[in-house]
């Protein structure tokens, strides 16, 4: 699949330049830029881009009206509003028009690219769809969430996981995913990492200040938080999916063997100074 073509609509030349810069060296390419609603409609008709980024304030019509005109001409148009404003009323009005998602300026490259991938549900393979629409948000949530919980940074690596089972020596937290897409997420850490993980999460000075049960409980709570962040991100972008999480269940032992139903599954790994943290996420239907 080639690069996805993006039309940028914004009355600010600087904003257009910033969005275009964020799309360099990604799966997206800028096919056109418009500074007002009339130009946006003309370029959309001529170029038929895969996606549109839309500002709220345009000199001849607001972003809602411009989006409505585009969607009247093409009901399948995929529009992302990027505006200085992002309140509940604006979001409700935008969704009523048919805008897919909303970001607030200034937007980071990662948020922009992730959101464009999520709203661009193109005809791709099931594996590619699950990777873009579900696994990547989980990877981003794991990476960013660990910074917040532990104060540690690490790059998230996502790989297809083809085995029907998972063997863990340590703690594994299993959380079910329900809704339009069903599946499960398993956060797991090796035995030597459990207390180090909990020590940093709870702000303790040494691992000796923690008992084993407390450390495992901390990993369980972290898993619940991290999975919640990922599902919230997906729900905010993919309208109608309404994903929900089941209460977490934790297994702790030297030889934990977890068998999974047939799903498209990915292993997300983040290497931290204290060791490796992994999340195994699998999805069944509804990409």
Image: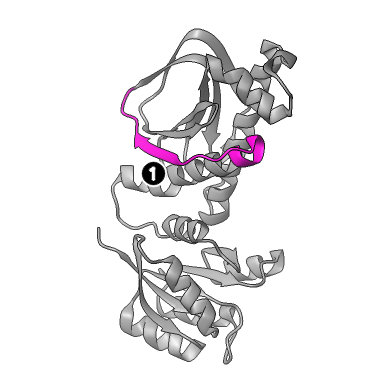
Tell me where residue 201 appears, x and y as whole percent: 68, 30
Tell me where residue 179 appears, x and y as whole percent: 53, 40
Badge 1 crowding class, 10 Å Cα cut-off, few under 14, some 14 to 19, many 20 or more, is: many
Q: Nearer the viewer, residue 194 or 40?
A: 194
Would residue 143 be found to the left or right of residue 286 on screen?
right
Q: Which type of secondary structure does the marked residue at label 1 adopt?
A: helix
Would residue 2 be found to the left or right of residue 255 on screen?
left
Residue drawn where x is 48% and y is 78% of the image: 16
Tell me where residue 124 appears, x and y as whole percent: 29, 52
As for residue 161 lying within the magenta part, the answer is yes
Residue at which label 1 appears: 130
Residue drawn where x is 60% and y is 70% of the image: 94
Q: Quadrant of the N terminus?
A: bottom left
Q: Nearer the viewer, residue 225 or 72?
A: 225
Where are the magenta residues, as a range?
146-163
Residue 39 sits above or below residue 90 on the image:
below
Residue 161 sits above or below residue 135 on the image:
above
Q: Nearer the viewer, residue 72 or 282?
A: 282
Residue drawn where x is 74% and y is 24% of the image: 204
């Amino acid at each position: 699949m080639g690069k996805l073509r993006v039309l940028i609509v914004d009355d600010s030349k600087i904003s257009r330049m910033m969005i275009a810069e964020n799309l360099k060296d990604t799966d997206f390419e800028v096919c056109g830029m418009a500074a007002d609603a009339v130009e946006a409609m003309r370029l959309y008709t001529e170029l038929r881009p895969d996606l549109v980024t839309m500002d709220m304030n345009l000199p001849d019509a607001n972003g809602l009206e411009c989006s409505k005109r585009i969607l009247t001409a093409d009901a399948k148009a995929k529009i992302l509003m990027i505006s200085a404003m992002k309140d509940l009323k604006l979001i409700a009005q935008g969704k009523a028009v048919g805008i897919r998602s909303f970001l607030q300026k200034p937007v980071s490259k990662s948020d922009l690219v992730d959101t464009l991938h999520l709203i661009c549900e193109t005809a791709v393979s099931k594996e590619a769809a699950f990777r873009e629409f579900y696994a990547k948000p989980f990877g981003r949530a794991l990476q960013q969430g660990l910074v917040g919980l532990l104060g540690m940074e690490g790059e998230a690596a996502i790989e297809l996981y083809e085995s029907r089972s998972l063997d863990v020596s340590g703690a594994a937290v299993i959380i079910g995913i329900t809704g339009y897409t069903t599946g499960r997420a398993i956060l797991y850490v090796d035995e030597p990492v459990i207390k180090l993980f909990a020590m940093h999460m709870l702000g303790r000075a040494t691992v000796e200040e923690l008992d084993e049960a407390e450390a495992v409980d901390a990993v369980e709570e972290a898993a619940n938080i991290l999975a919640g962040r990922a599902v919230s991100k997906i729900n905010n972008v993919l309208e109608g999916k309404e994903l929900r999480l089941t209460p977490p269940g934790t297994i702790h032992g030297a030889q934990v063997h977890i068998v999974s139903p047939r799903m498209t599954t990915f292993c997300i790994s983040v290497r931290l100074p204290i060791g490796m943290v992994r999340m195994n996420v699998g999805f069944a239907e509804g990409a």
